[in-house]
Image (cartoon, rainbow, N blue to C red):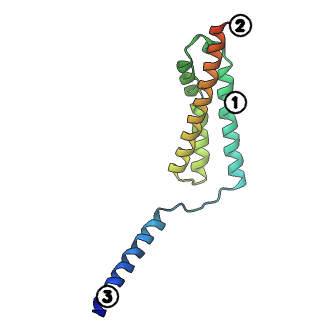
């Protein structure tokens, strides 16, 4: 009886240890990015936001529907995001993490642009804007 109990405990302990090993393999491994790399990424992010802002100022988009204008604006500035991706990859940041950050930034910027374009469109249609 004691042998069976010890064997059962040993099997359970082995299975839980194997599960812990798998879990630690999939956990986030903390990495460090140098200050110079962070500065490069922030500079590229600034350039992206500046590109988007400059594009939004063009009068051509005032004639378009807000969703179409937003799509065109985001596509015009896509090349700036590729520069940021290159910075990430040059610093050996995993592609998955770099792409996730770029996707998040693109999505948030798209939301902001769409909101601004919708406000401008509403102001034009109500006669408040020239």
Q: Position of residue 12 (x, y in %)?
A: 36, 78
Q: Quadrant of the N terminus?
A: bottom left
Mark drawn on residue 50: 1
Q: Which dot, 1 or 3, sits closer to the camera?
A: 3
Q: Label 1's element? A: helix
Rendered view: 117 above or below 127 = below
CA gap between label 3 and label 2 equals 84 Å
Q: Position of residue 114 (x, y in %)?
A: 59, 24
Rendered view: 4 above or below 106 = below
CA gap between label 1 and label 3 equals 68 Å
User: How many residues crowd around disc 2 within 10 Å: few (fewer than 14), some, or many (20 or more)?
Assistant: few
Label 3 with label 2: CB-CB less than 8 Å: no
User: How many residues crowd around disc 3 within 10 Å: few (fewer than 14), some, or many (20 or more)?
Assistant: few
Please name whichever residue, 64 or 80, is drawn nearer the observer in this view of the structure: 64
* Count of numbered marks: 3
The residue drawn where x is 70% and y is 41% is: 43
Mark drawn on residue 70: none
Disc with the residue nearer the chain's start (3 vs 2): 3
CA gap between label 2 and label 1 equals 24 Å
In the picture of the structure, the residue carrying the numbered disc 3 is 5
Q: Which dot, 3 or 2, sits closer to the camera?
A: 3
Q: Which dot, 2 or 1, sits closer to the camera?
A: 2
Q: Label 2's element? A: loop
In the picture of the structure, the residue carrying the numbered disc 2 is 130
Q: Position of residue 79 (x, y in %)?
A: 58, 32
């Amino acid at each position: 009886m004691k042998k069976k109990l010890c064997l059962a405990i040993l099997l359970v302990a082995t299975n839980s240890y194997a599960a812990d090993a798998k879990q630690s393999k999939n956990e986030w491994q903390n990495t460090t990015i140098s200050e110079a790399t962070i500065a490069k990424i922030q500079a590229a992010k600034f350039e992206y936001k500046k590109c988007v802002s400059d594009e939004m100022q063009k009068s051509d988009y005032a004639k378009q529907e807000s969703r179409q204008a937003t799509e065109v604006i985001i596509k015009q500035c896509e090349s700036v995001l590729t520069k940021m991706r290159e910075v990430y990859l040059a610093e050996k940041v995993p592609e998955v993490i770099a792409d996730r950050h770029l996707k998040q930034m693109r999505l948030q910027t798209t939301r902001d642009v769409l909101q601004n374009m919708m406000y401008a469109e509403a102001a034009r249609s109500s006669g408040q804007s020239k």
